[in-house]
Amino acid sequence: MQRGFEMPHERKRRMSKTRRDVTLLSVVFALFAVGYIAVSTGDGSLINSAAISPLGQLNSKLFQVSGSFTVPKISLDVDDVTLVIISNDQAVISLNGLEVDHVQGPLVLQGYEGEISVEGNHVSFDGSARSAVVDQVAINGNVAVSSAMDFEQLEIGELKQKRLSITGTGTLEVIGRGTFTVDTSADIRMFDGTLTFTDMMTLKGQAEKVVVESEPKISVE
């Protein structure tokens, strides 16, 4: 069939629609090709990469991490965390300047802000908490707390650190991207999660970037 004569305004409208269709297809394709994994050797050379992430995570740079480490010592400056300590009955804690000894059962500090230092199965802390539960007795309000005690288990929950530096050995898993051996240390950027201490330190949460000191050096972001 012979095509009829096309007026200039009709041709302009048809070309405009074609350009819109091409643009729409480009946008749809871009939605599927987002995110990347970069594992580098530290000198800028790329050794592994991928470009697949689920639809709907376009603006999220965070990924899930977990790990288990042998850590000689770690010191943290924290803000608004939940601190849970299971200690023996020899523990002594200072609450608003008053000493409470022979603490039994879990010690729970909510909204804790201050310093925490863990070395082996010994923890020391000095700061304040929004509430404290000691020997199953709750104390509300701003509570000044400090102690140095041995523990059986320690958990720091709702921990947010711009840079969580770990000196020690262990393994670190970036969910969906690989498990890496930590020979000496690791840096976890924008960490949001939980640290648990028993015989080892374990972590679970999410992060924006991980740098593992190993041979070769590994960076995941």
Image: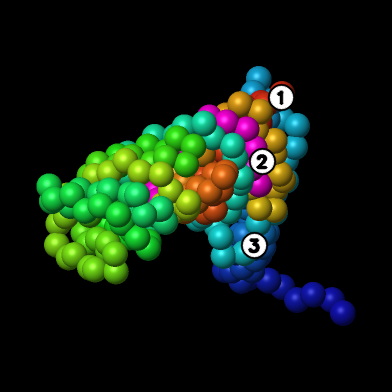
Measuring 72% from the left and 30% from the top, which residue is drawn there? 46
Is label 2 in a helix, a strand or a loop?
strand
Measuring 60% from the left and 50% from the top, which residue is drawn there? 66
Residue 198: x %, y % from top left: 53, 48
Quadrant location of residue 48?
Answer: top right
Query: Rounded to the nearest whole Å, what is the CA distance between mark 3 and mark 1?
Result: 29 Å
Quadrant location of residue 116?
Answer: top left
Is label 3 in a helix, a strand or a loop?
loop
Q: Which residue is mark 2?
A: 171
Residue 82 makes an appearance in the image: no
State which mark lies toward you, 2 or 3: 2
Q: Main secondary structure of the magenta part?
A: strand
Residue 178: x %, y % from top left: 72, 45
Graded by Cα atoms within 10 Å as few (under 14), some (14 to 19) or many (20 or more), the crowding at tag 1 reads few
Measuring 22% from the left and 68% from the top, which residue is drawn there? 138
Taking depth in this image into account, of 165 and 10 the one nearest to the observer is 165
Contact between marks 3 and 1 (CB within 8 A): the answer is no
Snapshot colouring = rainbow
Q: Which residue is mark 3?
A: 54
- Horizontally, residue 201 falls left or right of residue 5, namely left
Q: Amino acid at mark 2?
A: Thr
- Horizontally, residue 47 falls left or right of residue 84, namely right
Q: Which residue is mark 1?
A: 216
Magenta segment includes 216? no
Q: Amino acid at mark 3?
A: Pro
Residue 125 makes an appearance in the image: yes
In this picture, which residue range is highlighted in magenta?
159-173
Residue 129: x %, y % from top left: 22, 54
Q: Amino acid at mark 1?
A: Pro
Instruction: Please tell me which of labels 3 and 1 falls first in the chain.
Output: 3
